[in-house]
Amino acid sequence: MRSTLPSGRSPRNSRLLLVRAAALAALVAGGVGVTWSTYRGAVGEPSAHLDDHWHEGRVVVDRKGRALREIPSEAGHRGRSLPLEALGDRVVLATLVSEDRGFFTHEGVDPAAILRALGQNVRHGRLVSGASTITQQLVKLLDAAALAEVSGVVPSEGHDAAAGGEAGRRKRTLGVKIEEAARAQNLERTVDKRTILEAYLNRLSYGHGLTGPEAAARGYFGVGASALSWAQAAYLAVIPRAPSALDPHAHPERVLLRQRALLDALRSHGLMGEADHARAMQEVVTPRGLQRPFLAPHFVQALLADGRLPESGVSTTTLDLDLQRDVEGLTRTHLAALAGFGATSAAVLVIDGARGEVLAHVGSADFHDERRAGQVDLARARRQPGSALKPFVYALAFAGGRTGAEPLPDVPTSFPEASGVYAPGNFDGTFEGPISAREALAGSLNVPAVRLAAELGPGPLLASLRQVGFVSLTREAGHYGLSLALGSGEVTLWELAEAYVALSRGGRRIPLRTLLPAPDEPLPDGEPVLDAAAAALVTEALSDPLARIRGLHGRGPFTLGFPVAVKTGTSSGYRDTWAVGYTRERTVAVWVGNPDGSPTRELTGASGAGPLFADVMKRAMADVPVRSPLWEAALLEEAEVCPLSGQLPGPACPDRATRRFRRGAAPHEACGWHVHAQPGAGRAHVVTRAGKVIAALPDVYEGWLASQPEGAPGKDPLGVPWFAQRDVTGFARASLQGPAALQLDSPVAGAVFVRSRRSDAGAQVVQLSASLARDAVKEAGVREVEFLIDGAVVARSRHPFRASIPAAPGDHEVMVRPSDAASPVQGAVARFSVR
């Protein structure tokens, strides 16, 4: 029998030989394994660099996510890293099929891919296929970036290196490839697959500085990565193989060829159905031209200058791009209309009053216009604000006890200062005489504002203005003097906007915000810098169109169809015009003038900045469906007063007006200015009930009255003549405010009496009582008073002045006055109701 084995070898010897060979192979393999394991332990892994940001640029977006500007990293990359799940399945799957189909099955190195690539390269006689896994490519990216950081060479684009110029790129030797394979296996044992895939995708270069699928999708197609179609996803997935050779703009045919092959591969691997494949093959993919947004330039420049932006990633700002564009358009339109008046530029801020968020920021007429210093942010430039500072002077005065109804003397006045005598005048060169504080504020009169500043003191006034937010007022109080009340110190539009936001918020200041807070962040409470009721009184005055008429000379652009508090300002020489105002929801601040400080052709705040303010405010409020009252109703109360004296109407007062006061601060004394008097010699008058009504003004008005025509009528609608108190004989003066007056102790103003069931014929008995100081009673000779209900005398009483009378249901007016018609003592009036 012929043996089937080779001659000379017994079966036993053959088996022994096989065992020895197997043992030798095991020893070799084991030795190689030990050696490889030792080598891997020596080369480490690059997971420490997973947190680097060389591939990420900075993207500034508006509050709705629309790009305002993309700022590349130092390496020139415009990456926008996203979590893996946010990138969308299509671009992830397309990249896996394109780069590493076995990613989720290998351990960092794919032996099958190595053998396949080796065979292809041998057949073609040249390098046509690589075998690097995604993990190996990530190692290359991380190592190259780390090497570039050490060498000081920024990472550059490229599929293999993706980092470093020649100085920062390692040579592709066999030793380097072996080391990368070892580090790749180590990395896979350190972090999970999804982390590796996410880090890899976000570092892939797609050309033109676009790094990562999100940046590429937005750069080439204007959509996020998760919104890509299959055709677009496959198109992007092939670019990282060679970003320069596969540039979509330079070589679109190359990209399309590889895109179609990738779509076929996706179908063959069962990752997309026939219908999706057919649709993707038919879809025309056309990358758009590269967009480099440069919107709201001064707003973004300020963020960069302030160091507010993180080193990488997306920064969501408070800006509303729709509003920004509209405000820019309105600014251009109004500047075109003002070209003939010598105004060449403007700045505008729109603020959300509830949160202090900047919604629009226009810093100049045109950022790119060098002739008009377009790159200078005029919203941050220091300028004299003129009368725009006056509301804060009045707020401090109201906080100190002044009321909006009380009169302030608008008469020629000299104020001594260290530098000499300061004698301010009004814009139109005239003086109004007595004028209520609210009208003086709304009408922008100068002397009353300076008078209040003198009462406050320059030092305390300056300290308070700084607390409100005018940090540009850096000089000492003596440098500014009392003219600070008229805006002689330089401030910025930004500071004015922040301060007026505080007024709109009841005196609580919040810093203006430019980065959007978290959605669940509560509304800021703010720091109290102004008394709440005082801020409400200022708002009430600035929002009254009738009160503003005096300052606008009967015309103005501020009839907007909704209540708005607004103040204008004009600097000396017509150099700067301002208009700043607010509702509860929006604050708008506008400056119009010339960047070089040259004067306009007599533009004022009302004629220069005012019309632009009005249009911007209307546009800003169009986004506010529900509008709140301008102030908290609980802060103020209403009272009927004499519009001249600001006191309760007296028997001689020819007019009444409803005014608002801090709650509990309404006047209690009757008007001491209006009296009945008959003419005497010269300007003298004698008080008598039979005479005509005149106004006897305190002595502070004497010099001003002397400059008026004799018996000049007052500025009130009824034309009551005004005289100095010293010219009125029989005028019993307890103080400069007027003559002695009776006071109604019962009923008090606004009292409501509820009838008892036993009241006769439905009437209610009301107790009447009045009083006057004892020395005044004796001096003035008041022996008896009479009480009048609704104009009819119902009772007379000697001291103490008391009576009881029945009053029918309804509203009534009670008056008490001396029974002697010749008495100079003034009566008192109050309203009450019987229910």
Image (cartoon, grey):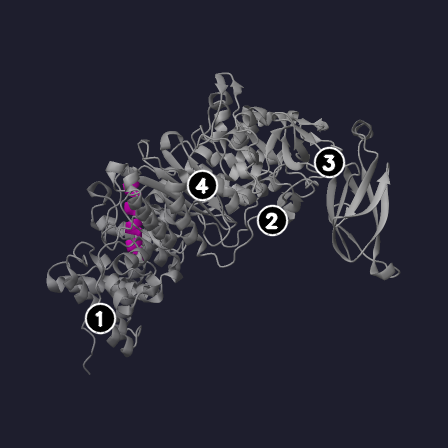
Q: CA distance from mark 3 to mark 2?
A: 36 Å
Q: CA distance from mark 4 to mark 1?
A: 123 Å
Q: Is residue 380 visible?
A: no
Residue sitting nearer the eye, 302 or 738: 738
x%, y% of residue 630? 55, 49
Q: Amino acid at mark 4?
A: Leu
Q: Nearer the viewer, mark 4 or mark 1?
A: 4
The tag earlier along the polypeptide, 1 or 3, is: 1
Q: Mark 2 and mark 4 in contact (Cβ < 8 Å)?
A: no
Q: Which residue is mark 1?
A: 9
Q: CA distance from mark 4 to mark 2?
A: 27 Å
Decide which of tag 2 and tag 1 comes sooner along the chain.
Answer: 1
Nearest to the eye among marks 4 and 2: give it: 4
- For the residue marked with disc 2, what is the amino acid? Glu
Q: CA distance from mark 2 to mark 1?
A: 112 Å
Check contact, mark 3 vs mark 4: CB within 8 A.
no
Q: Residues within 10 Å of mark 1 (few under 14, many from 20)?
A: few
Q: Which residue is mark 4?
A: 552
Q: Amino acid at mark 1?
A: Arg
Magenta-drawn segment: 135-149
Q: Is residue 145 magenta?
A: yes
Is 223 a magenta residue? no
Discs 3/4, front: 3
Disc on the earlier residue, 3 or 4: 4
| Element marked by disc 4 | helix
Q: What kind of secondary structure does the magenta stretch mostly adopt?
A: helix
**Mark 3 highlights which residue?**
826
The residue where tag 2 is placed is 632
Q: Nearer the viewer, residue 744 or 301?
A: 744
Looking at numbered disc 3 in the image, what kind of residue is underneath it?
Gln
